[in-house]
Image: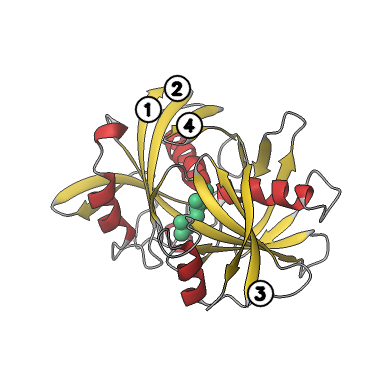
Amino acid sequence: MKLRFTKMHGLGNDFVVIDATRAPVELTPARVEAIADRHFGVGCDQLLVVEPATQAGVDFRYRIFNADGGEVEQCGNGARCFVRFVHDKGLSEKRELRVETCSGIIAPRLRDDGLVTVDMGVPELAPARIPFVSDSDAVVQPLQVGGDTLAITAVSMGNPHAVQVVADVDAAPVAGQGALIERHARFPARVNAGFMQVVDSHHVRLRVFERGAGETLACGTGACAAVVAGILRGLVESPVRVDTRGGELEIAWAGPGAPVLMTGPAVTVFEGEVELD
Ligand SMILES: N[C@@H](CCC[C@H](N)C(=O)O)C(=O)O
């Protein structure tokens, strides 16, 4: 069976996007892994599926699968690509959508300048809801990793993030330490590991070792989580420019109880067809 797809990216965080609005697509973890494989498949960090809404007052359902085949709750760079895809494919006339995900409703808006702003919802900080095993709700918490005690801030943007501050993001042990943090026992659903360097009060640099995908060129929810952590720690003030290896995002957050707004690009690369199984 052949599956049509569109290859897209947000700052080099790349996606295979599938339109399942007219007919359902059966995606097993093995199928997702095969499509995401960079040598034997199309290659991507995440596979995104556009489905009909299942609730009133919502335009579409957005499903996200990591390259390892696991379905996850949220993807920020993908959310920008989602509204660009829906618009360019003529699936909706609207430039601002309400989209249901596993972790709630987000609202991506295609702006006249071509960038996309997404209301990513209110960040969750309560450890049990991240989920993060801790009996303290302190903003900065110790985490033992490979003989080091890291000072992390745990944040959920619908998906879990552990953010630490580093002096130089280029020298940070993202691959080695990131893999250990991803599978740390105190994060029972695994976690995305963020390494943030503060440049000044409105500018950070960020690398993220993503759960289920490894280090990516950018992580949208990682950028939101890093700015939330930075503001809560008193290190930065909204809005914050976040430089990733794939380019730059702007993140705005008014503080606890407010939604995080993420602005950045969404790019279509090519379309194709892939054989399933
Ligand atoms: N690249 C994404 C996040 C994708 C999901 C993440 N790897 C997870 O497992 O939670 C983004 O731009 O937010």
Query: How busy is the neighbourhood of tag 2: few (under 14 within 10 Å), some, or many (20 plus)?
Result: some
**Helix, strand or loop at mark 3:** loop
Separation (CA) of disc 2 from disc 4: 11 Å
Amino acid type shown at disc 4? Val
Residue 198, label in figure = 1
Disc nearer the start of the sequence (3/4) = 3
Q: Which residue is mark 3?
A: 25
Q: Which residue is mark 4?
A: 242
Where, by quadrant of the figure, is residue 64 drawn?
bottom right
Name, please, the residue furthest toward the left: 147
Q: Residues within 10 Å of mark 3 (few under 14, many from 20)?
A: few
Q: Nearer the viewer, residue 8 or 39?
A: 39
Quadrant that contains the N terminus: bottom right
Q: CA distance from mark 1 to mark 2?
A: 7 Å
Is residue 154 at all visible to an observer of this figure?
yes
Q: Amino acid at mark 1?
A: Val
Q: Which residue is mark 2?
A: 201
Image position of 107 (left or right of 94) = left
- Residue at figure coordinates x 50%, y 26% from the top left: 237
Foreground label between 3 and 1: 3
**Regarding mark 2 in the picture, which secondary structure is present there?**
loop
Say if residue 159 shows up in the picture: no
